[in-house]
Image (cartoon, rainbow, N blue to C red):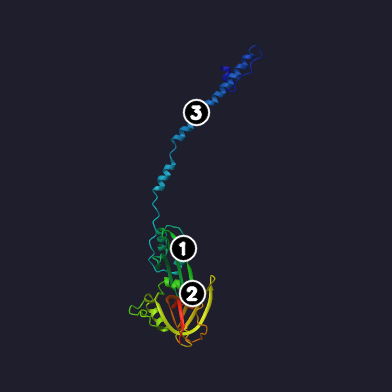
Amino acid sequence: MADALAVATGTAREAPCDAHAPHKKIEIARASRTRDEYHAAHMKRLVIALALLACNKPDTSSSTQAAASSVPATTPPAPFTGALTGDRVMGSKGIVHPFDAWNGANAKLEGQMGKATLVKNDRYTWAVAQGDDCFYTQVEKQKDGTVGMVMDPMKVSKGGPIMNWDDCLTGAGVRKEAAEDPNAPGPPTDGKAIGVLELRDGAAKARSKWSGAKVTVKGLYLSTTNLESNGTPMANVSITAAKSDLKNVISCSLADPKAVPAKAMQYDPITVQGTVKVRDMLTGGGDKIVDVDLEACTMTKAK
């Protein structure tokens, strides 16, 4: 046994070549098995030690979750209460996106620009006019409580795109729809014919009373414009209040495009019946005016 341990530790001495040689080989074999068993035992102890270390390792995942749960939710910014400027409007780009939750998105927008300057039909507008420039952005609120359309902030200058100019000035409160005159008369209810000036003046002052009303109008035939929309022929007749008066003109879209009298001459007296349509229009200079026309008209040439 002593010889085996000597072999295992590398201190064995070579035995003389005599009758004990077979015994030497057996001892060397035993020494090899002993060395293997030693390594196996050592590995076993190492595995057990590692297992114990793993068992004693703190649960970092649970502590991480606990730390995360202790972090307070992001507080929405307080609404901006200062004077809205073009820089603040232009700086709102990218703050919100379509399908964001509306409440959180609106809080961010109000934190940047304050309360919307105009809310109409779930469309929120932030706008401010500065000299001959106007800055605005628009964001829509969807029925499901999320953000819909998001318009990038835009700077519009006087003389630029007239529709954007009008939207911006309206959103900024600079341009407002004319208030109706509660004392202005409505259209006649007895079918009596009225003049072009009476129609335009009455509808502009009390559009809610005139819009959609069926009226009879007399005036002077000016011209006919024939056109086609999606393969359907159409005809619009222009009627003026007086000769050479191109300011007080109404358009009458005919129910039957072929109903224009064949021999109608410019400034011939005519009478038309139709449905009043009142709408806001923009001039080439960006000014808003009230436009009054007739739809589904029938006409006769005065005798």
Q: Are marks 3 and 1 in contact (CB under 8 Å)?
A: no
**The disc labelled 2 sits on which kind of residue?**
Ile
- In the rendered view, does 222 fall on the left or right side of 32? left
- In the rendered view, does 92 fall on the left or right side of 182? right
Comes first in the chain, label 3 or label 2: 3
Residue 189 is marked as: none
Q: Is 291 drawn above or below residue 54 in the view shown?
A: below
Residue 11: percent from the left, percent from the top? Answer: 59, 21
Which residue lies under the disc numbered 3?
45
Dot 2 falls on a residue whose secondary structure is helix
**The disc labelled 1 sits on which kind of residue?**
Met
Dot 1, how many residues are within 10 Å of its Cα: few (below 14), some (14-19), or many (20+)?
some
CA distance for labels 1 and 2? 21 Å
- In the image, 233 versus 97, the foreground residue is 233
Q: Are marks 3 and 2 in contact (CB under 8 Å)?
A: no
Q: Is 270 drawn above or below residue 117 in the view shown?
A: below
Q: Is 219 drawn above or below residue 145 in the view shown?
A: below
Image quarter of residue 65: top left
Q: Is 67 drawn above or below residue 92 in the view shown?
A: above
Dot 1 falls on a residue whose secondary structure is strand
Which residue lies under the disc numbered 1?
149
Which residue lies under the disc numbered 2?
162
**The disc labelled 3 sits on which kind of residue?**
Arg
The quarter of the picture where the C terminus appears is bottom left
Residue at the image point whose x is 46% and y is 32% from the top: 52
Residue 125: percent from the left, percent from the top? Answer: 42, 67
- In the image, 184 versus 82, the foreground residue is 184
**Badge nearest the viewer, 3 or 1:** 1
Residue 250: percent from the left, percent from the top? Answer: 46, 81
CA distance for labels 3 and 1? 68 Å
